[in-house]
Image (spheres, rainbow, N blue to C red):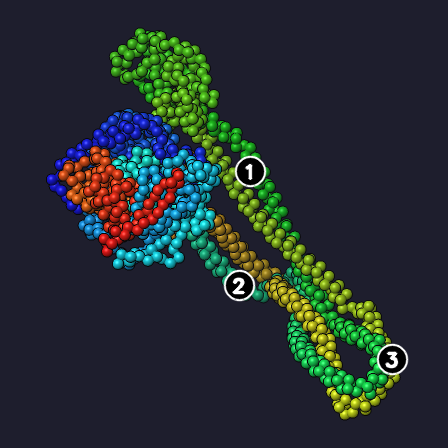
């Protein structure tokens, strides 16, 4: 970069004058208030109703981020202007997923304005960013960079519903912005500070979309220049460029008829001609084709472009054709045309102000044409290719930045050329997205705070519930240990008792063995007596019964065995039938396949033989034709006879077909007749098995029903007893409640008196002694209130403890007495000093009661005293209702029934584990003594103990009912299962019986089948006879035919006979094959039917076999069950029979020794009975211990631990511990019982709402969900911010790199054109090129730095041309059309510009309209324009002098 050190002071002086320049331009813009040219053109477009193009930027630039203005007086912008700008910027934000770098967004960031200078409260925030004077820029940048973090943390949240017109911010509000986490709470209740831990946990940081500090623009410039000095590199290989070859104008403006202008040179052409000849119409023709409006072509409407002269007064249209082609520049200076690159773009306008576009004579539209031209590099947006007459200096005079979205400034001009304008809209929409996501984050943060508050409000109740559950878990653990001790003791007792029983049984066995002879004598004695005879008879009857039972089992066993044999036999038969059916079916399938192959093969052979026979018949016919004269008569006779045989042959064929069909049907009937009837026996066996099953199930069903009925009766009796208990319970509870109330009131009265202590007691003694009058005592004792409001009034009115006196004098006497006797302090209410107030009822929200109206004074004179301390305090049922009333349109003081108080100021108090009560009684307070209180409490405790016993009994009954009711459904399930089994067996029985009937009907010989078989046999015999008869009737004719044919054969000789034999042989073969095919088809059909039949038989057999297997399985189960049942009965029967025989033998043997053995018998039986009694006692003890063990095991099984580890508590055991015997031995039952009793009392007396744990769990889950949503929203916002920073960085980097290149080229161009001058593009704001725009500073040769507006016309022209040429270097345009750009230049400068154009036209086509010979003499081709009779014509001339000079 070239620097001129001596000129720098002048540049700074010029920069210092920027304020005045910008202010004047803005004041001028503000004062005019006119619409932009683009808007005017738009209005013309609507009037003309044509589809035309205005070359304004396709992406409006004024919708971007808020801008700063450099006006000295910021208040000069009217509110109306601000509202207009803001309303135009309103745009729906788009999500980050839709954003690409090539897309365009809009966005207004008001929060940026608020944060940029928070210490200036008088500053009015606006939607557009204000320009500042240079002296303010550094201070603002420094302030923003140093305090960006602190400004962001205190940003107020912009409200979406706020008015678009900005409002002044008061200093106090701007200086005391609440943190984001406290906004909601502050607006609800400013007096309640938020706890610091919650704030730290829940506060989030709002992000300013434009807060990220990007790289400094000049650093980007220096970096890009340090990497490589921008140089113009000539392309290594020629690239095609588009040029205009010539124009064809038809009736366009001054060009009448069809006029060809051109051809133009591919580099430098000049259009010359006198003023008014139509030179500028050449440029207008290009504008017309390129889609510009009529106003750009100096006409009011498009129809005015049609030529109108005396010779052509009423033309209907005009048209301009622009002929393009592509060329390749050659290194030697020449060029070559790209083949097939010619293109004609034309536009035709009509009288009705409409127009049409064409490309290569095909109609198209405006968008296609302009898109094509833009793709070829023609800048239709900023018209860089076009410099009109008088507009050349306007390029460099553009404002640094556009004043509105419809204007163009130098910044927008350069940004569109560089290509970074594509980032403007994405940046704006990304900023809008960040703002929207900020709002989402704030909303989700508020939700998290709300859930946190609700969760913390449940902490106390949750902790109480957890403590209660821990107590219950501890109780369960202690009970588990105690129950295990009981179980262990029962097990020890059981073991000891079992050992004693074993020993006793052994002794008894030994005693019985030792006294075997005595036993025989006892049996002998029993037989000799009636009792012995009866016992024997009973034993005999029992034995007989057992024998009968065994006979029954034996019978069933035989039946089961027979059924099993039957089923096994049937299974074998079915398996055999299945195997045979499978083999037969396979054989039939093979036969079907074989017959199918035979049919196909023989059919093919028949076709070959028929083909061969046709050939042989032709030979035979030829031979006969040769013998026609000799055999004609014979042939005619044969034909006549054969014709007479045709009806007989048809009948024979019909009869033979009928015989085949009948024979097939007869075969099927014969096979069906031979089918077996094995299934009948199987079905009958199945019926017997099913009936046996039904009988067994029915007996079991009756037993279960009897058990169920017994349980239901017992449960009904217990429920009746429980109902009686339930009827008594309200009465007992009422007595308990009354006793508790009396005791509580007495205790409260006594406590109140004791609490007042010496004060109240002393004053009461003073009153009773008559030494003071007008003292009434404690205020709470002077009235009554319903007991449900006790907590409410005790909480809301602590002044109930005040003492009431009539006057000041009485109060003073009381105070003196207390002071004199040193009794303490007291507060007094003076009845005579209470103000007169309206104590009548007032209207309350939701008609809730007023606490004062609920108090019943013992004397009306105390009402003012109560009103003075209660006033209009209301009573609500709960806190939710209280909040609704307290924070309504009018503030109320509200107290809830459970003691939570909301004051008028909004403060809330109450809660906790203890609430105030006893401030006022429901009955007038009476004097009670300590002894009376103790008696009332003793009565209460006695009633409670009785009620506890009552509840224990009630729970015991409930437990018993529950056990029986639990057993009943089990029995019902069993009964239902048995019923289903019986129903299923009945269904199976019905199916088996129906199957028997079906099988009987199926296998019974059918009369119809027999008659049908006989009819078929008779029919077949009849048909065969008819066939034979037909053959007999036709035999004579056939013999005659054969004789005639033999004659013909004799006439024909050997050749005819041989040929005839050959044909007959083929016919015979065909007939044989045809017969084989017919037989094969019959066999195929028959085997197919047989295969289907065998498959059906096999499927039926499989089904029956499956059922047989099931029946066998069930039968085996029944047999096994029967064997299990029979085993015990059989053993008992055998034992009974043996005992009976033994007893019989013993009675017969010992009958004679009756008297002798009586003593011995008695002694022996006494010892045996004693041992048996001891054995029975031990067995009872054993049963009792086992019962107790089961009882404690059941109670132990019902115990369990409640898991509360998910509530933040330490992980506890999931199951109760199982202790070892040593551990149980070390435990003390008494201590466990004491701990259990204490825990039971503690848990029973606890008032805990366990449902709060579920609510707390839901709140914790909701808090986690809300926090996750917040984290997701924060991540989305940070991602959007990252995308925004990337877009801003891309825009800044791309713009500054292009800006640096253009600025260097501008300096070079201006120095070259002016031969010593200097020009430079500068950033108005060195830290942000997009905030204030670009300044074009120029230092003409031998002059100081000046603003472009202070230059002369020629200097402006040179400056503009330098910028145009610099932009051409940066981004070449293939076509330039210039209209008298040299008008303001002197001879020297014209020559310089012309020489530069001539030099730089190697890669572009310049068409210059000029009247200066210094310009057009350097052109390679001159297009002369002249006008005759108001009609323009043209002629093209090669500049041979210049060409010769160049060569």
Q: Earlier in the sequence, mark 3 or mark 2?
A: 2
Identify the residue position indicated by label 3 in the image.
1029
Q: CA distance from mark 3 to mark 1?
A: 107 Å
* Residue that appears at 23% across and 53% down: 1445
Position of the C terminus by quadrant: bottom left
Q: Position of residue 724 (x, y in %)?
A: 57, 35
Q: Position of residue 988 (x, y in %)?
A: 68, 60
Identify the residue position indicated by label 1 in the image.
722
Which image quadrant for residue 459? top left
Mark 1 vs mark 2: in front: 1
Q: Which mark is residue 330?
A: none
Mark 3 vs mark 1: in front: 3
Which image quadrant for residue 333? bottom left
* Residue that appears at 54% across and 32% down: 728
Looking at the image, which is closer to me, 724 or 419?
419
Q: Position of residue 1152 (x, y in %)?
A: 66, 65
Q: Do the residues bearing badges 3 and 2 touch, measured as CB atoms within 8 Å?
A: no
Q: Earlier in the sequence, mark 1 or mark 2?
A: 2
Identify the residue position indicated by label 2 in the image.
509
């Amino acid at each position: 970069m070239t620097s001129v050190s001596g000129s720098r002071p002048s540049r700074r002086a010029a920069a210092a004058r920027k304020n005045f320049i910008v202010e004047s331009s803005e004041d001028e813009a503000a004062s005019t208030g006119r619409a932009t040219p683009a808007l005017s053109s738009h209005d013309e477009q609507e009037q003309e109703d044509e589809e035309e193009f205005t070359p304004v930027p396709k992406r409006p630039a004024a919708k971007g981020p808020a801008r700063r203005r450099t006006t000295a007086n910021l208040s000069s912008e009217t509110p109306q202007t601000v509202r207009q700008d803001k309303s135009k910027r309103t745009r729906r934000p788009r999500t980050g997923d839709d954003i690409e770098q090539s897309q365009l967004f809009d966005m207004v960031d008001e929060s940026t304005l608020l944060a940029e200078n928070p210490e200036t409260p008088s500053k009015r925030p606006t939607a557009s960013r204000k320009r500042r004077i240079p002296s303010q820029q550094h201070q603002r940048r420094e302030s923003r960079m140093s305090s960006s973090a602190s400004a962001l943390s205190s940003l107020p949240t912009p409200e979406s519903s706020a008015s678009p017109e900005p409002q002044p911010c008061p200093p106090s509000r701007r200086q005391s912005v609440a943190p984001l986490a406290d906004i909601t709470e502050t607006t609800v209740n400013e007096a309640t500070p938020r706890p610091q831990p919650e704030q730290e946990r829940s506060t989030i940081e709002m992000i300013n979309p434009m807060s990220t500090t990007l790289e400094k623009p000049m650093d980007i410039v220096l970096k890009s220049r340090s990497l490589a000095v921008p140089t113009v590199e000539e392309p290594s290989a020629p690239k095609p460029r588009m040029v205009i070859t010539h124009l064809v104008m038809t009736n366009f403006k001054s060009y009448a008829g069809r006029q060809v202008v051109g051809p133009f040179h591919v580099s430098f052409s000049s259009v010359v001609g006198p003023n008014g000849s139509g030179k500028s119409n050449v440029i207008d023709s290009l504008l017309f084709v390129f889609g510009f409006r009529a106003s750009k072509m100096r006409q009011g409407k498009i129809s005015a472009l049609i030529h109108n002269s005396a010779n052509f007064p009423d033309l209907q249209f005009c048209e301009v054709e622009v002929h393009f082609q592509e060329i390749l520049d050659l290194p030697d200076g020449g060029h070559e045309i790209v083949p097939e690159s010619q293109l004609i773009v034309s536009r035709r306008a009509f009288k009705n102000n409409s127009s049409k576009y064409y490309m290569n004579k095909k109609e198209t539209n405006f968008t296609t044409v302009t898109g094509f031209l833009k793709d070829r590099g023609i800048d239709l947006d900023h018209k860089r290719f076009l410099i009109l007459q008088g507009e050349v200096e306007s390029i460099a005079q553009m404002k640094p930045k556009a004043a509105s979205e419809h204007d163009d400034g130098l910044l927008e001009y350069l940004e569109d050329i560089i290509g970074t304008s594509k980032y403007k809209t994405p940046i704006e929409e990304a900023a809008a997205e960040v703002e929207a996501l900020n709002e989402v984050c704030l909303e989700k943060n508020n939700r998290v705070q709300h859930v946190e508050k609700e969760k913390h409000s449940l902490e106390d109740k949750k902790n109480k519930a957890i403590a209660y559950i821990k107590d219950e878990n501890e109780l369960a653990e202690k009970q588990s240990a105690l129950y295990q001790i009981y179980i262990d003791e029962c097990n020890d007792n059981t073991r000891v008792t079992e050992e004693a029983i074993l020993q006793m049984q052994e002794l008894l066995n030994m005693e019985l063995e030792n006294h075997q002879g005595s036993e025989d004598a006892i049996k002998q004695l029993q037989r000799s007596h009636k009792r012995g005879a009866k016992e024997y008879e009973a034993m005999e009857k029992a034995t007989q019964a057992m024998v009968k039972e065994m006979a029954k089992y034996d019978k069933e066993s035989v039946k089961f065995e027979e059924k099993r044999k039957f089923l096994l036999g049937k299974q074998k038969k079915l398996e055999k039938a299945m195997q045979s059916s499978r083999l037969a079916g396979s054989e039939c399938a093979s036969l079907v396949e074989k017959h199918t192959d035979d049919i196909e093969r023989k059919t093919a052979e028949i076709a070959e033989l028929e083909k061969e026979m046709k050939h042989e018949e032709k030979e035979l016919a030829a031979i006969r034709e040769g013998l026609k004269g000799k055999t004609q008569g014979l042939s005619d006779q044969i034909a006549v006879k054969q014709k007479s045989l045709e009806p007989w042959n048809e009948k024979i064929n019909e009869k033979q077909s009928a015989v085949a069909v009948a024979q097939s049907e007869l075969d099927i009937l014969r096979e069906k007749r031979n089918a077996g009837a094995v299934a009948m026996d199987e079905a009958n066996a199945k019926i017997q098995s099913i009936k046996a099953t039904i009988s067994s199930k029915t007996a079991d069903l009756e037993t279960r029903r009897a058990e169920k009925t017994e349980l239901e009766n017992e449960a009904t009796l217990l429920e009746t007893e429980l109902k009686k208990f339930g009827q008594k319970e309200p009465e007992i509870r009422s007595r308990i409640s009354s006793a508790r109330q009396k005791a509580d009131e007495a205790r409260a009265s006594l406590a109140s008196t004791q609490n007042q202590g010496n004060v109240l007691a002393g004053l009461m003694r003073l009153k009773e002694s008559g030494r003071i009058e007008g003292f009434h005592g404690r205020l709470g004792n002077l009235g009554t209130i319903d007991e449900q409001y006790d907590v409410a009034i005790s909480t809301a009115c602590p002044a109930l403890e005040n003492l009431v006196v009539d006057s000041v004098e009485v109060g003073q006497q009381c105070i003196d007495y207390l002071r004199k006797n040193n009794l303490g302090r007291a507060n007094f209410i003076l009845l005579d000093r209470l103000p007169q107030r309206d104590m009548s009822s007032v209207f309350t929200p939701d008609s809730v009661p007023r606490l004062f109206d609920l108090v019943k004074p013992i004397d009306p004179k105390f009402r003012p005293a109560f009103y003075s301390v209660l006033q209009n305090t209301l009573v609500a049922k709960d806190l939710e209702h209280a909040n609704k009333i307290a924070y309504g349109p009018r503030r109320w003081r509200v107290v809830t029934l459970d003691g939570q108080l909301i004051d008028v100021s909004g403060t809330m108090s109450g809660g906790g584990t203890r609430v105030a009560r006893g401030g006022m009684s429901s009955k007038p307070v009476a004097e009670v003594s300590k002894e009376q209180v103790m008696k009332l409490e003793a009565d209460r405790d006695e009633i409670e103990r009785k009620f506890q016993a009552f509840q224990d009994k009630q729970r015991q009954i409930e437990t018993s009912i529950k056990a029986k009711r639990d057993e009943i459904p089990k029995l019902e399930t069993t009964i239902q299962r048995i019923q289903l089994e019986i129903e299923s067996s009945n269904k199976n029985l019905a199916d088996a019986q129906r199957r028997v009937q079906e099988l009987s009907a199926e296998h019974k010989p059918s009369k119809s089948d027999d008659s049908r078989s006989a009819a078929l046999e008779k029919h077949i015999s009849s048909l065969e006879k008819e066939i034979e008869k037909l053959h007999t009737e036709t035999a004579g004719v056939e013999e005659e035919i054969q004789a005639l044919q033999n004659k013909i054969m004799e006439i024909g000789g050997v050749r005819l006979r041989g040929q005839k034999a050959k044909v007959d042989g083929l016919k015979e073969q065909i007939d044989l094959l045809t017969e084989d095919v017919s037989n094969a088809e019959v066999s195929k059909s028959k085997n197919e039917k047989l295969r289907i039949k065998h498959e059906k038989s096999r499927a039926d057999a499989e089904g029956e076999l499956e059922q047989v297997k099931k029946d066998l399985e069930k039968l085996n189960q029944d047999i096994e069950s029967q064997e299990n049942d029979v085993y015990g009965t059989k053993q008992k029967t055998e034992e009974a029979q043996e005992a009976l025989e033994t007893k019989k033998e013993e009675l017969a043997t010992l009958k004679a020794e009756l008297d002798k053995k009586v003593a011995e018998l008695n002694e022996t039986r006494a010892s045996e009975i004693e041992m048996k009694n001891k054995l029975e006692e031990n067995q009872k003890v054993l049963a009792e211990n086992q019962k107790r063990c089961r009882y404690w095991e059941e109670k132990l099984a019902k115990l369990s631990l409640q898991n509360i580890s998910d509530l933040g508590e330490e992980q506890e055991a999931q199951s109760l511990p199982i202790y070892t015997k040593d551990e149980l031995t070390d435990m003390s039952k008494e201590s466990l019982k004491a701990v259990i009793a204490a825990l039971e009392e503690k848990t029973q007396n606890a008032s805990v709402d366990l449902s709060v744990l579920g609510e707390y769990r839901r709140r914790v889950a909701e808090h986690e969900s809300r926090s996750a949503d917040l984290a997701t929203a924060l991540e989305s916002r940070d991602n959007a911010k990252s995308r925004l920073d990337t877009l801003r960085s891309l825009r800044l980097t791309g713009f500054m790199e292009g800006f640096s290149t253009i600025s260097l080229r501008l300096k070079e161009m201006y120095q070259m054109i002016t031969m010593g001058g200097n020009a430079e593009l500068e950033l108005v704001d060195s830290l942000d090129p997009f905030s204030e725009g670009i300044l074009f500073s120029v230092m003409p040769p031998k002059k100081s730095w000046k603003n472009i507006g202070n230059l002369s016309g020629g200097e402006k022209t040179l400056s503009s041309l330098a910028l145009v040429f610099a932009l051409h270097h940066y981004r070449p345009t293939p076509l330039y059309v210039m209209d008298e750009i040299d008008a303001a230049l002197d001879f020297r400068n014209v020559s310089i510009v012309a020489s530069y154009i001539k030099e730089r036209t190697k890669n572009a086509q310049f068409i210059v309209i000029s009247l200066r010979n210094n310009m057009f003499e350097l052109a390679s081709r001159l297009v002369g324009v002249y006008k005759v009779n108001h009609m323009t014509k043209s002629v093209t001339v090669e500049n041979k002098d210049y060409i010769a000079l160049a060569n």
